[in-house]
Structures are given as C-alpha cells and as structure tokens.
Image: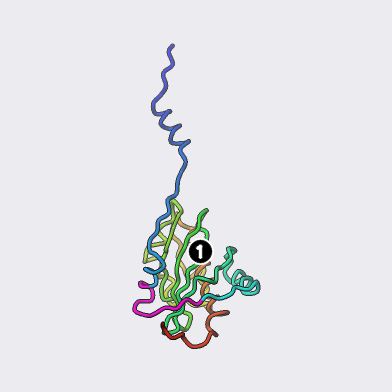
Amino acid sequence: MNWKPNPFLIIGLVAVSAPIVAHAKIYVSVEQAQKILIPNKPLVKNPIIITDELQDKMRSASGVRQTFQGDRIWRAADGGWFIVDEVVGKHEMITYAVALSPSGAVTGIEILEYVESYGYEVAEAQWRNQFVGKTASDPIKLNQDIQNIGGATLSCKHLTDGVKRVAVLYDIALKNQSQAPKAK
C-alpha cells in the first residue's frame, strides 16, 4: 500500500497554520469627522487635564477601564463639543469621535479606525444613530436603550460604554466651562 498525501489535508493544514490578520480600516480622519459632525463651525482645541478623581468618576459611570486622553477635545464656536476617544473592541482598539450639543446631547458619532476582523457593522449609520439625543442622564446601555448587533456584541458594548463615558465627561467636566471661545 502506497501512501499518497491528500491535497485537501495539506490545504487545510496551511489554512490552519496561517495567521489570521486583522487590518486596520480607517473610515475617516479626525478632520473629516469634524466636518461631518460639526459642519461649518470653527473648532478650537480644548484639552483638559484628566485627574485621577475625574478618571475614577468616568470609569465608575461607564465601566470603561482604558485611560481617557484629555488632549483630543475641541470646542465649537456655538458651545458644542467634538471628542475623540478609544475603546477596545474584542482585542483591538476602536477610535471614534462623538459630537455633543452645547447642552451635552450626542449629535453624532463617527468611527475613525476599526482594527478587528469582525464587528465592523458598528460603523454603519443605522447603529450609530441610536445615540443621537442621548445625554449622561440616559442609561446608554447595550440591550437597554442601545440595540446590539449579532456578531459584534463586544464592539457594541464597548462603544456604548465609551459614549456613556464621553457624556459623563461633559456632565462633570465640560458643561461648567466658560462661554464658547472666539474662533481664531
């Protein structure tokens, strides 16, 4: 009896041993997201210092453990806000932007960069639009006031928690800032 390798077995072994590579997909740049979310309004960079106390309040309200970076905040001439944040998807980071009205209500969300190999449906407008009008006083919880997407549960949950964190940031740190800055 002569042994002959099964070509399907060889192909299967190659497929199993080949690494699964996730490629970053950049949907929009920060500048593009600013034009989409806050069109025709000048923005001024408005970084804030995130103290341990502020970080703890944001973490307890949202459940997001990653440190929030206070250097990616802009204020619009009308008093609205544009904030870039990151949360983990399943394994990789998702970079997204949230626009807030002068009263702290979400006016829109854009996914800037998504690295995961699945769950990318969170970038679809229909899912993102669920956040419009939400404030820190809303639950902003997956399967409560935000619907899940099958196959993207962790990305949905973490982005939802991230938007809650941004809404809480407005409530405890941004809303008491002085009048809107003059555009340069």
Q: Among all residues in the image, which is located at the extreme top?
A: 1
Near-viewer residue (152 or 32): 32
Q: Among all residues in the image, which is located at the extreme right?
A: 53
Q: Is residue 27 above or below residue 3?
A: below
Q: Is residue 120 visible?
A: yes
The span shown in magenta is 35-46
Amino acid at pointer 1 = Glu
> Which residue: 48% across, 58% down?
153
Q: Is residue 5 above or below residue 115?
A: above
Q: Position of residue 58 (x, y in %)?
A: 59, 72
Write down the residue under mark 1.
86
Would residue 58 appear left or right of 106 to someone viewing this image? Answer: right
Q: Position of residue 54 (x, y in %)?
A: 62, 74
42 falls in the magenta region: yes
172 falls in the magenta region: no
In which quadrant of the rendered view does residue 102 lie?
bottom left
How are the residues colored? rainbow
